[in-house]
Image: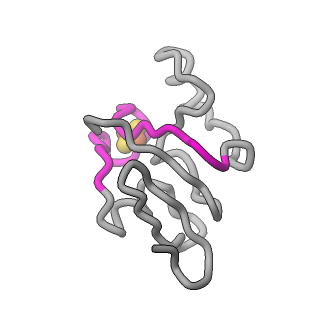
């Protein structure tokens, strides 16, 4: 169910729609604050890759990869829609899929 107003993002496959909080939060922060489970072995430091998500809507509006995320993307051959939850900030209407096993 969508919040009545404000900004929100959606986590698939469970279709969890949650409000976006503070400006500096990452998508991982928003997920954990709302009880959406995403692996985050390195604690959100951008070094483990376990928080990988597939962006299904809003990819064009996300900021470019940080240097750290870009290096990992090259090393692990991420597709452009594969982003690290701890390295992206939520934007209204963002829809991301948590891979099975995460
Ligand atoms: S939590 Fe480790 S890279 Fe995001």
Q: In which quadrant will I find the C terminus?
A: top left
Q: Which corner quadrant of the image does residue 50 belong to? A: top left
Q: Does the magenta segment cover residue 10?
A: no
Q: Is residue 55 above or below residue 36?
A: above
Q: Left or right? Give the position of 98 relative to 88.
A: left
Q: Is residue 82 above or below residue 58?
A: above
Give me the residue at 35% from left, 69% from top.
34
Q: Left or right? Give the position of 94 relative to 62.
A: left
Q: Which is more toward the observer, 38 or 13?
A: 13
Q: In which quadrant will I find the N terminus?
A: bottom left
Give me the residue at 54% from left, 73% from top.
22
Give coordinates of residue 41: x percent, y percent: 27, 40
Magenta stretch secondary structure, dominant: loop
Give me the residue at 46% from left, 47% from top.
86
Q: Is residue 46 above or below residue 79?
A: below
Q: Which is more toward the observer, 20 or 93?
A: 93
Give coordinates of residue 77: x percent, y percent: 52, 16
Q: Please provide the residue range marked out in magenta.
A: 37-58
Give me the residue at 67% from left, 43% from top.
59
């Amino acid at each position: 169910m969508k919040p009545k107003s404000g900004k929100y993002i959606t986590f698939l496959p469970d279709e969890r729609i949650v409000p976006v909080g503070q400006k500096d939060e990452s998508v991982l922060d928003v997920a954990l604050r709302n009880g959406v489970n995403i692996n985050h072995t390195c604690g959100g430091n951008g070094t483990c890759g376990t928080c990988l998500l597939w962006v299904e809507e809003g990819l064009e509006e996300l900021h470019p990869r940080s240097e750290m995320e870009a290096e990992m993307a090259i090393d692990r051959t991420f597709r452009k829609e594969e982003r690290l939850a701890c390295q992206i900030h939520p934007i209204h209407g963002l829809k991301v899929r948590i891979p099975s096993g995460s």
